[in-house]
Image (spheres, rainbow, N blue to C red):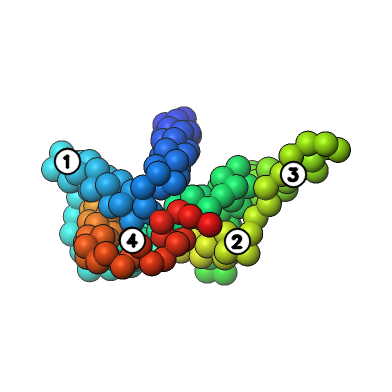
Amino acid sequence: MGTVVALALAASLFYGASDFLGAFTARKLTVLKTGTVIYLAATVVATIALAVTPWVLSDEAFWAGSIAGVFATVGMITFYAALAIGPMSLLAPLIALIQTAIPVFVAAVTGQGLQPQAWVAVGIALVATTLISVPARAAAGERAIERITARGGMLALVAGITLGLSTVSLDSAPPESGVFPAFLDLAIGLLLLLPLIAVRRFRTSDAWLNGTK
């Protein structure tokens, strides 16, 4: 149990750092350029993990990783596009809230039981994330606080749902699959992004893909 908690905390730390640095870079470059570099680096790491850890190939693992890859690619593009628009401090926890709610909803619908303390933890996490996402009121004379725009909210909604569904897809892979579904998730994302990055119009005509308002 302690190992699981430690791994979860480490994953949260790396995810948070990746989200911030990726969103910051997306504002300087384009969302597609940033996403392609991230997916390339992640695919290299996943390839190394695939070479040094045991895994089993199966139809279930293949489809789990493939479907997760499609969902994750859409989620990643809309995620960084939303954060590039900003405000990052509001959109990031909102996306996390939606992303967390999707697996919980799927588990409840499919009859996967959770321990009572797990439901309490989920509830606390959802409430905390919601409170973080609520903007404070600016005091008199201070600069108005940024609020979520309609476009930013739409991108956040799509990002949260697709990233949550990606997690659900990966979870459906057999336990003996090892890191293979995750590798497939990243590799498919990279294959989907490379043709997009090669098409110039996706880098110039769509403002939200460029991280501009």
The mark nearer the N terminus, 4 or 3, is 3
> Relative to 65, is 89 above or below?
above
Residue 89 shows in this picture:
yes
Residue 4 percent coordinates (x, y)? 44, 36
Q: CA distance from mark 1 to mark 3?
A: 48 Å
Select label 1 or label 2 by which is in front: 2
| Numbered tag placed on residue 203 in the rendering | 4
Residue 190 percent coordinates (x, y)? 24, 57
Residue 97 percent coordinates (x, y)? 60, 52
At horizontal 52% and vertical 62% (from top left) the residue drawn is 155
Q: CA distance from mark 1 to mark 2?
A: 37 Å
Q: CA distance from mark 4 to mark 3?
A: 31 Å
The mark nearer the N terminus, 2 or 3, is 3
Q: Is residue 77 left or right of residue 59?
A: right
At horizontal 72% and vertical 48% (from top left) the residue drawn is 134
The mark nearer the N terminus, 4 or 2, is 2
Question: Are there few (<14), some (14-19), or many (20+) residues within 10 Å of tag 1?
Answer: few
Q: Could you tell me if the residues under marks 4 and 3 are in contact, i.e. CB atoms within 8 Å?
A: no
Q: Residue furthest left?
A: 51
Give the camera-side residue of 35 and 189. 35
Task: Give the residue type that dot 2 points to.
Answer: Gly
Q: Which residue is mark 1?
A: 48
Q: CA distance from mark 4 to mark 2?
A: 22 Å
| Numbered tag placed on residue 153 in the rendering | 2
Question: Are there few (<14), some (14-19), or many (20+) residues within 10 Å of tag 3?
Answer: few
Task: Give the residue type that dot 3 points to.
Answer: Ala
At horizontal 30% and vertical 52% (from top left) the residue drawn is 33
Q: Which residue is mark 3?
A: 144
